[in-house]
Image (cartoon, rainbow, N blue to C red):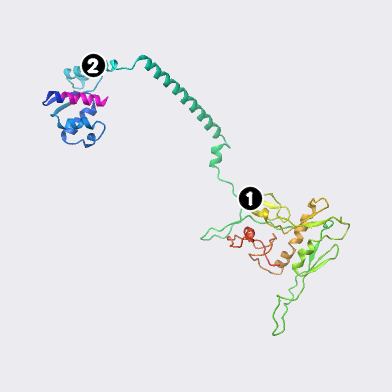
Amino acid sequence: MARSELAAALWTVLKAGRPVTVVTDSRYVHDGFQAVQRGDGSALLEDLDGDLWRQVRGAPDATMVWIPSHKSWEEARTLGYSREDWLGNREADHWAGVMAQARAAPAALSRFQDRRLELARAAVGVIGAAHQAALEHDSVPGGFFDRMRRTPRRLPTEKGPAGPCKRWLKPAQVGVGEPEGAAPDGVHQLVADAWDARPAYVPPRGCKRVGSHKVVWRASCTKCGAAAGRTSKWLGLGRTVCPAGDPAPELRWVGGCHLLEPHQHGLKCARCSLTCAVARREAVSRSRCSTWALVGADGAEIVGARGFAAWNAALPVRFALAAGAGATKVSKRAVPVEGAVQGPAKRPRLEPARAMLAPYASLSLIHI
């Protein structure tokens, strides 16, 4: 529509061949003519109607008068416009409508387009209703948006000392408690000698020192009297069937991996009470458990022996702690013991065979 009005005004100026006055109700034509005639309007020369505006620049000067359209004579007179300008604008609007009606689309094509628009409105309504139903479903408490806003739950971890760098934390370990009552048949009830700070062995001059001392520390079973000297032998004694009482001849001790089950700290081994995060399930479930299982002839584990087996497995570590041994970072096994040094630890750089023990570096780890 704007291009048609511009073309009509340009045709009038070019046909006159001299300065004329053009009355128009188009602000686009009125302001554009004035800008181009002043030497401005460079943007108009480059837009879609630039071919017409470049002709305006070479046409004779024209005086442009703007008049509001679709006004009554009383309204136009009140605004200060002459009757000639009002009549000319009204006549132009009439003939523009007549020509537009002559070039109107056929009635059948109009009805077809109306039908298309009606179908489009119905389809948009169905899509909008589906979106609204989906939003209402996802906005309820516990829905999709509620879960997206909720902070992911994190397992409780030990709080280490504040420092400039962020330390790697791990789930807190729970020490193995002493079981009550007597050990079941086939399980030793081990008791270690009391620590009395015996003096260290001093070899003669010129002899090579072997070990820290020559004192043998013993652990014995209160049920059958079996004993083992040196802490390195205690685990082997605890993994033999105790002959006291009347144990079944088919009983035997079997080693295996950690048996993980849900726990408040994430996961916990049902045998040795070692805890770990849920994300470490696969790695920890493949590592060897220090507590062996007592099984019968049918291969089923005797659950009642777990507590005493874990207590016997932790006996060397408790003895070393009582003797003042410190916790180290590398060992062949890890046993959670109450009183062990607990604290945040950095990720250790170990060979792959020992890398599975990395999350449990805060346990009491000693060479046995």
The quadrant of the rendering that contains the N terminus is top left
**Badge 2 density bin: few <14, some 14–19, many ≥20, Cα 10 Å:** few
How far apart in space, not on screen, are marks 2 and 1 (Cα)?
Answer: 82 Å
Determine which of the numbered discs, if any, sits on residue 278 in the image.
Answer: 1
Secondary element at image label 2 = helix
Taking the spot 56% from the left edge, 40% from the top edge, the residue there is: 147
| Residue 189 spot, x, y in % from top left | 81, 61
Q: Residue furthest left?
A: 18
Mark whose residue sits in front, 2 or 1: 2
Q: Residue at x 61, y 54 (%)?
A: 157
Q: Is residue 144 above or below residue 274?
A: above
Q: Secondary structure at mark 1?
A: helix
In magenta segment, residue 5: yes
Give the amino acid type for the residue marked by disc 1 in the picture. Answer: Val
Residue assigned mark 2: 95
- In x, y percent, where is residue 365? 67, 64
**Sooner in the amino-acid sequence: mark 2 or mark 1:** 2
Q: Is the Cβ of the residue at disc 2 closer than 8 Å to that at disc 1?
A: no
| Residue 66 visible in image | no
Is residue 11 inside the magenta stretch?
yes
Q: Whole-percent x and y of residue 330?
A: 64, 65
User: Can you give x and y, in whole percent of width and height, for residue 289 in the image?
Assistant: 71, 57
Q: Is residue 291 left or right of residue 10?
A: right
Which portion, as a residue range, is magenta? 1-12
Q: Which mark is residue 3?
A: none
Residue located 53% across and 31% down the image: 134
Q: Amino acid at mark 2?
A: Trp
Height in image: 308 above or below 55? below
